Amino acid sequence: MRIDLITLFPEMCEMVLGTSILGKAREKGIAELQALNFRDYANNKHHSVDDTPYGGGGGMVLKPEPIFAAVEDLLHKVYTDPETGRTVSGEPHTAPSGRPPRIILMCPQGRRYNQAIAEELAQESHLIFICGHYEGYDERIREHLVTDELSIGDYVLTGGELAALTVVDSVVRLQPGALGNETSAVTDSFSTGLLEYPHYTRPPEFRGWKVPDMLLSGHHANIEQWRREQALRRTLERRPDLLEQAELTDKDLRMLER
Ligand code: ADE
């Protein structure tokens, strides 16, 4: 898949995109990750990307022109064959997979991000994130450019970069081959609809605190059942709201009643 971040701070994004699992996914060609500075598309002498709001009031508003120009230039470069001048798919800005890119605006007013949305976005072939700073975006960006608006929670960040990078991280790790251990994305919290069961490693006793005997028993079926019960209990204690959506068996329900 390809992911582009449209930002005023590409170096901030690069640092994350080049590190750890994301850096490896990039090296292995699993995800093509780029950050593009929309200030380079400002069509005025001072390269300003924001202006005062019509109607007065404090703060600054991101102008539409540089953001539209950055996205349109990117779409042109990605989807046009330089030899023929034709789009790759025959349709404007449609990936060879047949799907147009998702153009995602990061803002506190967006749809609240969660693992189900991560799984949905992980199926796409191209995501473009618009990361703003300052007071807000000119409304025409929302109305005529973006396909989605996402928020990572009910708090306000100084900019969209950390929010976009959060989404990018959670989407890239779902790509086949991105994690060393293929099973780890399948069993993690939320993918099963439940919080994860507790994990232990050596030593079997640390400062007098012992690893539960069950995990040392070598009895795989019993260990699976113990883990399921722990995941159910932890979810009931910490996030009972998740149980309403989770697929629970009769056995799970009996365990919860105990
Ligand atoms: N930009 C500022 N705050 C944000 C949030 N909570 N989610 C997404 N983008 C943001």
Image (tube, rainbow, N blue to C red):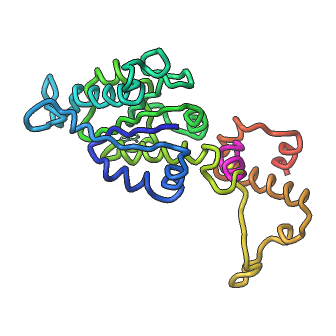
Please say if 51 is above or below 14: above
Query: Does residue 189 belong to the magenta stretch?
Result: yes
Q: How many marks?
A: 0
Residue under the point 55% across and 51% down: 28
Q: Position of residue 207 (x, y in %)?
A: 68, 84
Closer to the camera, 176 or 110?
A: 176
Whether residue 256 is visible: yes
Q: Quadrant of ligand 1?
A: top left
* Magenta portion: prevailing SS class: loop
Q: Residue 198's quadrant in the figure? A: bottom right
Q: Position of residue 232 (x, y in %)?
A: 76, 50
Q: Position of residue 122 (x, y in %)?
A: 57, 37
From the viewer's perspective, is 102 left or right of 40? right
Residue under the point 49% across and 32% down: 126
Closer to the camera, 71 or 245?
A: 71
From the viewer's perspective, is 68 left or right of 90? left
Residue that lies at the very extreme toward the bottom in this rendered image:
207
Residue under the point 37% across and 26% down: 82
Q: Residue 110's quadrant in the figure? A: top left
Please say if 250 is above or below 14: above
Identify the magenta region.
183-194
Q: Position of residue 162 (x, y in %)?
A: 39, 48
Please say if 50 is above or below 27: above
Residue under the point 30% across and 38% down: 132
From the viewer's perspective, is 2 left or right of 208? left
Whether residue 236 is visible: no
Query: Does residue 12 belong to the magenta stretch?
Result: no
